[in-house]
Image: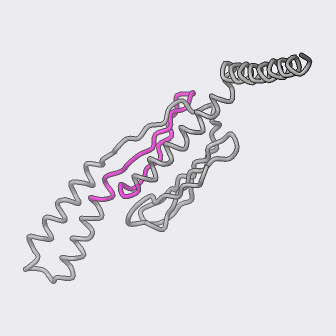
């Protein structure tokens, strides 16, 4: 599996997380931060056999959305009364709050009942979808590897082909002898 690197916030674009696969494990490195200050990350390696469900959810933080909307609205109202630099700054802050309040989350349910939530910035929705697709492919491959019926059917088909070759060879020898 390829390594998927994602931003944790539009404002703190330099703080990155990643999702990758290592043999039979999926590795989640989720950054932790205090505002704009990085505080390290939580790093987990989860066995593929322990993952029961992968789903995508959209999460909105209503408080930050409303505050961002109000700041944006206020910056337009007071544009003539305040210096333009201040209005543009308040407008950018409001837009950043609106964008940061909308998240696309990759939720990974484990067989233990625990849920690992990986938040993506809404602009990186395609990365979240790709990560979900790759994790589901790993789970599917693992199920196929441990499915006895698939291996038995494959063995029967291989034996049938070998039997057909042997029968054709015997028929060819009988025709040469006659």
The percent position of residue 29, horizontal first and vertical second, equals: 57, 52
Say which residue appears at 48% left-offset and 68% top-offset: 14
Q: Is residue 112 magenta?
A: yes
Q: Is residue 10 magenta?
A: no
Quadrant location of the C terminus in the rendered image = top right
Q: Is residue 70 left or right of residue 43?
A: left
> Vertical placement of 76 versus 109: above or below?
below
Say which residue appears at 76% left-offset and 20% top-offset: 164
Q: Residue extending furthest front?
A: 178
Indicate the quadrant where residue 59 lies. Answer: top left
Say which residue appears at 56% left-offset and 39% top-offset: 137
The region drawn magenta spans: 98-124
Q: Is residue 133 left or right of residue 23?
A: left
> Vertical placement of 141 versus 171: above or below?
below
> Vertical placement of 53 versus 89: above or below?
above
Q: Nearer the viewer, residue 174 or 1?
A: 174
Indicate the quadrant where residue 82 lies. Answer: bottom left
Indicate the quadrant where residue 134 lies. Answer: top right
Q: Is residue 173 left or right of residue 78?
A: right
> Vertical placement of 59 versus 145: above or below?
below
Q: Nearer the viewer, residue 36 or 130?
A: 130
The percent position of residue 2, horizontal first and vertical second, equals: 60, 53
The percent position of residue 131, horizontal first and vertical second, equals: 51, 47
The percent position of residue 86, horizontal first and vertical second, equals: 20, 79
């Amino acid at each position: 599996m390829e390594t998927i690197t994602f931003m944790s916030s539009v404002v703190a674009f330099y703080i990155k997380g990643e999702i990758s696969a290592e043999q039979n494990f999926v590795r989640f490195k989720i950054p932790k931060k205090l505002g704009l200050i990085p505080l390290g990350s939580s790093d987990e390696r989860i066995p593929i056999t322990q993952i029961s469900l992968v789903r995508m959810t959209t999460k909105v933080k209503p408080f930050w959305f409303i505050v961002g909307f109000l700041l944006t609205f206020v910056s337009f109202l007071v544009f003539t009364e305040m210096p333009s630099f201040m209005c543009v700054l308040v407008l950018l802050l409001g837009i950043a709050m609106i964008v940061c309040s909308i998240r696309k989350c990759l939720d990974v349910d484990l067989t233990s009942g625990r849920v690992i939530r990986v938040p993506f910035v809404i602009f990186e929705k395609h990365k979240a979808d790709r990560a979900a697709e790759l994790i589901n492919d790993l789970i599917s491959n693992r199920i196929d590897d441990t499915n006895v019926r698939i291996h038995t059917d494959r063995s029967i088909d291989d034996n049938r082909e070998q039997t057909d070759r042997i029968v054709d060879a015997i028929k060819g020898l009988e025709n040469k002898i006659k």
